[in-house]
Amino acid sequence: MYSTQDLHFDNSFVNYLPEETFFQRITPTPLESNHLVSFNPSAATLIDLSSDEQHCSEFISAFSGTSPLARMDPIAMVYSGHQFGSYNPQLGDGRGLLLGEVLNKKQERWDIHLKGAGLTPFSRDGDGRAVLRSTIREYLCSEALHHLGIPSTRGLCIFGSNEPVYREKIESGASLIRLAQSHIRFGTFEYFYYTQQHDALKTLADYTIQRHFHDALEQPNPYIYFFQQVIQKTAELIAKWQAAGFAHGVMNTDNMSIIGETFDFGPFGFLDNFDAAYICNHSDYQGRYAFNQQPSIAYWNCSCLGQALLPLAPAEDIKTVLNQFPEYFFQCYDNLIRKKLGLFEEKNTDKILITELFQLLQDQQPDYTLFFRYLSDYKPNKKHKKLSGLFNDTAQFDAWIAHYTTRLLTEKVNEQQRINIMKSVNPKYILRNYLAQIAIEKAEQKDFSEIDKLLKILSTPYDEQPENEEYAKQAPAWSKTIQVSCSS
C-alpha cells in the first residue's frame, strides 16, 4: 500500500483541456484547526492508500487543503445546469476543488475532490464552505449506496474544524474528501452548448469518450454511442434507487454524473414507511424531486443532455436514443423487483402481482426495507407475525400474500436457495435519517464514534449482525420531525 508521497497523480483533465475555458486553478483555503473526524479504509484501498496514513501529518495537510502536494494541481471546474427546471447559465465548483487524479496499481483513475475548500470564482453568494452535518451525511450515504450495489461516489475521509459557518444557524465548518471516477456532469456539456462554444463542447466530448467510453471510438458515430451509454447507465442507476427506496432529493442536471454514479448528495433520504410521493427535500415545495418522480426527472435530464449534444450529432439519432430510456429503466427495475420477491421464472401474471403489492404498500405504508427483509424469510402457508405485523389492515395483506404464495409455489428454486438470494438483495441495514442524525449530534459534541460504527454496519447491509439489531429497527416517531434541505 502507498503512503501519501507515493500516490501516482496523473491529472488528465488539466493536461487535456485548456485552463480558463474549462477550469481555473485555485489554492484551497484551509479550515481553522483542521482535524481528522473519520477515515474510510475501504475507500482508501481504491487509491492503494495505506490505512496508517490517517495518522500521518502529511496526509492531513495534503488532503485537508492545508498544504496540497505539488503533484495535485487543484482546480475549480466550470459547468451550468437546470436547477428545479430552470436553466442557470453558470454554476461551477463553488465550494469544491478537484485536487488531482490518482492512478492506482490497476491503472484505474480516481478523482480526489475536496468539498468545503473555500471560495472559488464560482462561489456566487456562497462562502465556499461545507458543514459537519452535511459532510457526515454524504460520507455515510455514499458508502451505504456503494455497499448496496448502487453506483456512487465514495467517501475517503472527513475533516472537522473550529471554524464557524453560517447556515440556518451557526455550525462547525468541515470538509470531505470524495473519490469519484469522474466529476463531469450533464451540466458541463450544457455550459458549452448554451454559451455556443461548440469547439469546446467537442473537445469535452472527445475527452469524456477517451476517458470513460473508449468503446465509442470504434463506432460509426462515437457521440451517439456515448449518449446511448449515458442514457443506459442513468436509467439503470435510477432503477436501482427506486428498488432500494432511495430518494436523491435534488436531481438538477449539474448533479447528474456523466458516468451514471450517484453524485452530489444533499437532502437525500431512504424510505422508512413506504410513500411513493415521499419528498425528502424540505425546500422542494412543489415535489419536483419526489421519490416517484425520479424516473421521469432523469429522463428529462437526459433530454437536456441530448439538447446539448445537438452540435455533435443528428437530432433524429439523439431522439431515437433518448426514447430508449424507459426500456432500459423498466428492464432493470422489473428484474430487481422480481429478484426482491424471489421470482426467477417470469410469468404473465407477475405484473398484476407486483401492481397489487405496490398498491398494498401505498395504502398501508409499512416500513419498506423491513417488509422486503421479512418477506425474504417467508415460507408458504406458514404464519409470519413480524411480516403481517407491519400492516394495519390484515385483510388486504392476507389477500396479497395468498396470491404471492400461489405464485411462489410455482418456482423451481428450492426454498433455502430462494431465501438466500432474497436476502442478498433485500438489505437489513440502511442509512435511515434518524441514524445519520444521531451520528451528527454526537459529532457536534466531538464524539465521532457513531460515524465509524455506522460506516462499519453499512458496509455489510445484507448480513445478519446480531450485535447491531437496534440499527435495523423501524424509525422512531421523532424521526418524522427531521427536516433536510438543499443546505444539507
Image: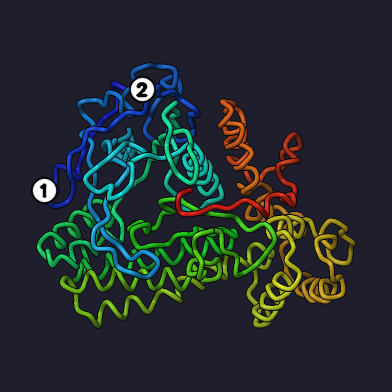
Using the image, determine if residue 121 lies above or below residue 295: above
Tag of residue 18: 1
Instruction: Point out residue 281 in the picture as x, y percentages from the top left corner.
Output: 52, 59
Judge by depth and name the residue closer to the eye, 271 or 261.
271
| Residue located 14% across and 58% down the image | 203
Say whether residue 427 is left or right of residue 264.
right
What's the image's color scheme? Answer: rainbow
Could you tell me the amino acid type at mark 1? Pro
Which quarter shows the N terminus?
top left
Above or below for 377 versus 109: below
Q: Is residue 179 left or right of residue 407?
A: left
SS at mark 1 in the image: loop
Q: Nearer the viewer, residue 409 or 190?
A: 190
Q: Residue at x 76, y 69 (%)?
A: 364
Which of the labelled discs sits on residue 253, or is there none? none
Mark 1: few, some, or many residues within 10 Å (few <14, many ≥20)? few
Residue 127 image point, x, y percent: 33, 42
Write down the quadrant of residue 368 in the picture: bottom right
Q: Position of residue 129 (x, y in %)?
A: 37, 39
Total labels drawn: 2
Left or right position of 257 against 236: left
Depicted 40 relative to depicted 311: above or below: above
How far separated are the C-alphas under marks 2 and 1?
A: 29 Å
x, y percent for residue 369: 68, 56
Q: Do tag 2 and tag 1 residues touch (Cβ < 8 Å)?
A: no
Label located before the other in sequence (2 or 1)? 1
Q: Which element type, helix, strand or loop, lies under badge 2?
A: helix
Tell me the residue at 24%/42% (across/down): 120
Instruction: Give the residue drawn at x 88%, y 58%.
Output: 385
Q: Is residue 253 above or below residue 75?
A: below
Three-letter amino acid code at the position of disc 2 = Phe
Q: Which residue is disc 2 drawn over?
A: 59
